[in-house]
Amino acid sequence: MKTRFELKGISKFYKQKVDGVHTRYTLLPGNKASLVPVLQDIYLKIYDKKINALVGKSGCGKSTLARIVMRLEEYDGGEILYKGKNIKTIPGKEFRKENQMVFQNPLLSVNPCFSVYKILSEPLIIYKRDKKEINEKINHLLEMLKIPCSFLDKYPSELSGGELQRIVLARALVLEPGFIILDEPFSALDEIMAARLLRFFKTIVEHLNVGVLYISHHLKRVGFLADYVNQMENGRIITH
C-alpha cells in the first residue's frame, strides 16, 4: 500500500479573531503574540488508491488541513512528503494535474458566467489539449457520471445543487488525476440526495482507481464510504 501524502508535525497559526473572523497568518520567528493554533502537531498518512476520511466537528481544522495538503495554504511548522519527496519541491503545474479538490459549495467553485461546456473544457485548454481530445474527454465524463448532454449549454444558476456538484466532480476528473480531495461536498444536500450521490461517487472512484481524501462532519457518511478514517478535534488528530 503506497503512501501519497505523509504529514509530519504540521502546525498552522492564525491571528486572534477580529469580529469573529480568523485572520490568516504565517508564523514569523519571534512574533507569537495573540496567535491561535489551528493545527497542532499533525502526523498523518494518506494512502494512494484508497478512500481516506477526515472527520470532525465544524471548526476543528479539517478544511484548513485539506487546503494545506492541496498547497492552497502555507503551513507554519513540520513537513509534508508527496510520494516520498518534500511537497514544496514538486512543480505546481504537475502537482495540480495529479491532484484535484472539490469544494463544499459548488456555486463558489465555478464561474457563473461559464456554460457547463466551458467549465469542463477550461482545464484541458490550460494543459493545451486539442479540440478533438477535449470533446472526447467531456463526452466520456458525461456518460460515466450520467450527466445529460443537454447540460453542456446550461449555466450554474440553471442547475440544482446535486446536478452542479456532479459538474464540479466532472471538472475535477477531466485531467485524470490520481487523487481527489472532497471537502464536505454533500453537506448542503438533504440526506436522501447525499446518500444517493455518495453511493454513486463510491462506484466511480472504485472504477477509476483513484485515491480520495474525504472531509466530513458526518460520521455515518464517512463510515459508508471510507477505507481509512481519521478523527480530528481542536486541530489535532485524535484517532487513526
Image (cartoon, helix red, strand yellow):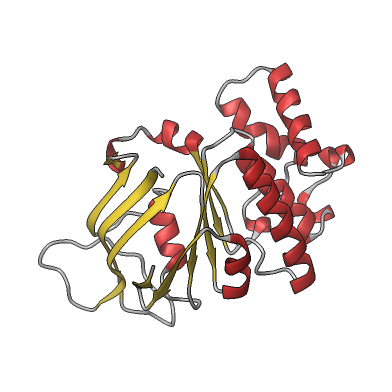
Q: How many marks?
A: 0
Give percent across and percent down for residue 196.
77, 62
Q: Residue at x 36, y 70 (%)?
A: 23
Who is closer to the viewer here, 189 or 191? 191
Q: Quadrant of the C terminus?
A: bottom left
Q: Which residue appears farthest toward the left when viewing the image?
A: 30
Give percent across and percent down for residue 41.
25, 67
Determine which quarter of the picture holds residue 77: bottom left
Q: Residue at x 79, y 54 (%)?
A: 163
Q: Is residue 100 above or below residue 30?
A: above
Q: Is residue 147 above or below residue 104?
A: above
Determine which quarter of the picture holds residue 220: bottom right
Q: Is residue 131 above or below residue 20?
A: above
Q: Residue at x 73, y 50 (%)?
A: 166
Give percent across and percent down for residue 45.
36, 55
Residue 121 placement, left or right of 217: right
Residue 143 placement, left or right of 99: right
Q: Which residue appears farthest toward the front when viewing the image?
A: 1
Who is closer to the viewer here, 191 or 109? 191
Q: Which residue appears farthest toward the bottom when viewing the image?
A: 19
Who is closer to the viewer here, 23 or 41? 41
Give percent across and percent down for residue 216.
55, 68
Residue 69 appears in view: yes
Determine which quarter of the picture holds residue 75: bottom left
Residue 218 appears in view: no
Residue 194 placement, left or right of 17: right
Q: Quadrant of the N terminus?
A: top left
Who is closer to the viewer here, 76 or 222? 222
Q: Residue at x 64, y 33 (%)?
A: 122
